[in-house]
Amino acid sequence: RQQTRPSDVGARRAAGLIRTARGVLEHPLPAGLPDDAWRVLSKRAQPWLMAATRAWQRQGEHLLGSPTVVSDGRRPIVFIPPRAYVKFYETRGDRGSGLAAESSALAAAESDADLRVPAIEAQGRIDERWQYLILSRIDGVPLRQVRSELSPASLEHAARWLGGFVDRLHHLELGETAIPGSSEFERAVVERRDALVQPDAARSFLPERLASRLGAWMPAAEELAVPPDEAVLLHADLRDVHVYGYHVDGDFRPTGVIDFDRACLGHPAYELGPVWRSIARGDRDLTLTFMDAAWSRRRDAAPTPRLALAWCLLHPAVHGQPLDIPEVEAAETLEELAERCFGQAPDTQADRSASESPVGEG
């Protein structure tokens, strides 16, 4: 209030940015904020701490430490020590779909005990606008935090473990589910494809010599369609910040995968984009190690180099910023880029696979 001009107080109070103490206690999270007010509120800790404390105490639990806000930048998350997170969802517009996706995906994962994902401990509503999930903690640290300290062998192990995780995820029996369906996925893919092949869009992440050819090279919508009855449950955002593990003596021992709020039903190759960009960072051997494990049960269905690159380019984790990997600088054509990144067919490595259990080991 000391930094707000008196003439602005009324407008800021109407927007929910200035509230009385009684109002905060009764409704810690104001409903229906415009986007600019939402951005301001999402950076403030106190409303989320109060709401998380209320949600936790509803379960008959006592606080054993001070909650802390650990938001992922997209939605508020509060850590309740020592073992749980409260994740908030506003039930309006696109923000409302995350709750259904995450809760349905995690419920489906319960059928496979070897899929290491957070368990849903409780679900509830703060008020008419705000809902939450209380999720168990996955031990360890994110791969991103320690990646620079890992040996090539440790990174290879992490890639193979993640491929095994994806293989199990894609083979879950789903039945009736509230996860966004494959028709919605295909519609979004077609819209994204049509937008990306525009020259100005392509130049935002590819050099001119490649961007100018993207429209003619990109597979048609029919080639990107999900085969009948073959839509799988996708995590859809397998970046290094979502893969957790123990960091011990320069080694990374995976413990699980978090954040399923973008889960959907779709084409299995859609998982490649964030793995290639964020975890493998364009490294062909790491990418093929992941693919070898992810398609271990259906090697004939693994994408060709052209389709693998196309699916990567269609993912926001890839086209959201310039591709600064060496392969892009070296390739003169998109065909060459696809071969440089995905050209060696994943081998069976039967002897290694027989002695390893990618998802079951720590």
Image (tube, rainbow, N blue to C red):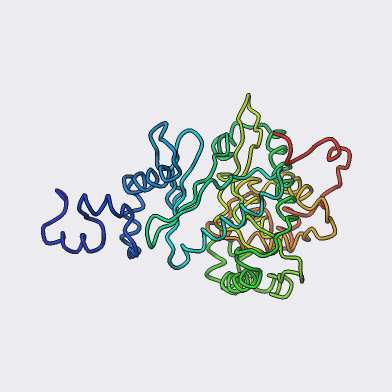
Image side of residue 133 versus residue 174, left or right: left
Q: Residue 4, how many percent across, how many down?
A: 16, 54
Nearest the camera: 146 or 219? 146
**Residue 357 drawn above or below residue 294:** above
The outermost residue toward the right is 351
**Residue drawn 57% across and 45% down?**
242
**Residue drawn 71% across and 70% down?**
224
Q: Residue 339, how many percent across, how many down?
A: 76, 56
Nearest the camera: 27 or 163? 27
**Residue drawn 33% across and 65% down?**
34
The outermost residue toward the left is 6
Image side of residue 210 versus residue 26, left or right: right
Identify the image quadrant of residue 102.
bottom right
Nearest the camera: 17 or 225? 17
Q: Residue 55, how many percent across, how many down?
A: 41, 47
Image side of residue 4 versus residue 104, left or right: left
Q: Residue 118, how many percent across, how many down?
A: 58, 44
The outermost residue toward the top is 249
Q: Quadrant of the C terminus?
A: top right
Nearest the camera: 199 or 13? 13
Image side of residue 99 versus residue 247, left or right: left
**Residue 268 drawn above or below residue 344:** below
Please count the marks in the image: 0
